Image (tube, rainbow, N blue to C red):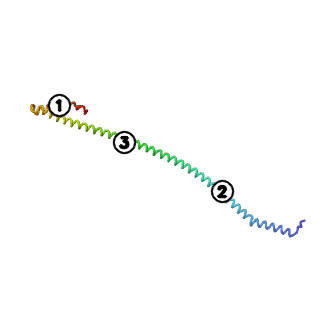
Amino acid sequence: MIDINATLIAQILNFLILAGLLRAVAYKPVVRMLKARQDRIQESLDKADADAEEADKLLAEYKAKLAEANVKAENIVLMAEKRASEEREAKRAEVKREIEQMRKAAKAEIDREREHAVQQLRTEMITLSMAAAGKIVAKNMDKSENEALISDFVKELDKDKIGDLPC
């Protein structure tokens, strides 16, 4: 059986004092340290959650900006294609205009050359006619009659045609 004596009471008293000292010296600081550690861990977890949310926001923002940039790039490409098409059409119109001007210039040159040829032909015909008429009536006509004959010959020529050449 258990003897209750002074030693037992001293041991119980020592145990209680030791438990009180350990609680005051060791237990409360360890609990405080564990609580502080728990608070730091919780703070780190909260910060990680906030950073994850911020990262999600940034990702969504970057995706929106990327989509916007893609739309702008497509618009730029479409505008460049449209401008190139307009420039191509403008060049075509300019080339057509230049060709038409060349055609008109060539027609005008041809008309000038034809008129020049007609004038030369008339001059040659007059010269030949005068020479022929001069030989035929060389001694029978004077100069005024000769000019009148030439004048009549020129009047008889069709004003729109010389031979089969249109003027």
Q: Is residue 7 above or below residue 53?
A: below
In the image, what residue occupies the spot 50% across and 46% down?
74
Residue 41 drawn at (x, y percent): 67, 59
Position of residue 84 in the picture relative to residue 17 (left or right): left
Hey, what amino acid is under mark 3? Val
How many C-alpha atoms fall within 10 Å of the one at disc 3: few (<14), some, or many (≥20)?
few
Dividing the picture into quadrants, the one containing residue 38 is bottom right
Mark-to-mark CA distance, 2 and 3: 73 Å
Residue corresponding to mark 1: 153
Q: Is residue 9 above or below residue 39?
A: below
Q: Nearer the viewer, mark 2 or mark 1?
A: 1
Position of residue 21 in the picture relative to residue 134 (left or right): right
Residue 45, label in figure:
2
Dot 3: element: helix
Q: Is residue 10 above or below residue 99?
A: below
Looking at the image, how many numbered discs can be counted on the residues? 3
Q: Earlier in the sequence, mark 2 or mark 1?
A: 2
Residue corresponding to mark 3: 95
Q: Nearer the viewer, mark 2 or mark 3?
A: 3
Q: Is residue 20 above or below residue 105?
A: below
Viewport quadrant of the N terminus: bottom right
Hey, what amino acid is under mark 1? Phe
In the image, what residue occupies the spot 81% across and 67% down?
15
Dividing the picture into quadrants, the one containing residue 127 is top left
Q: Nearer the viewer, mark 3 or mark 1?
A: 1
Dot 2: element: helix
Viewport quadrant of the C terminus: top left
Dividing the picture into quadrants, the one containing residue 49 is bottom right
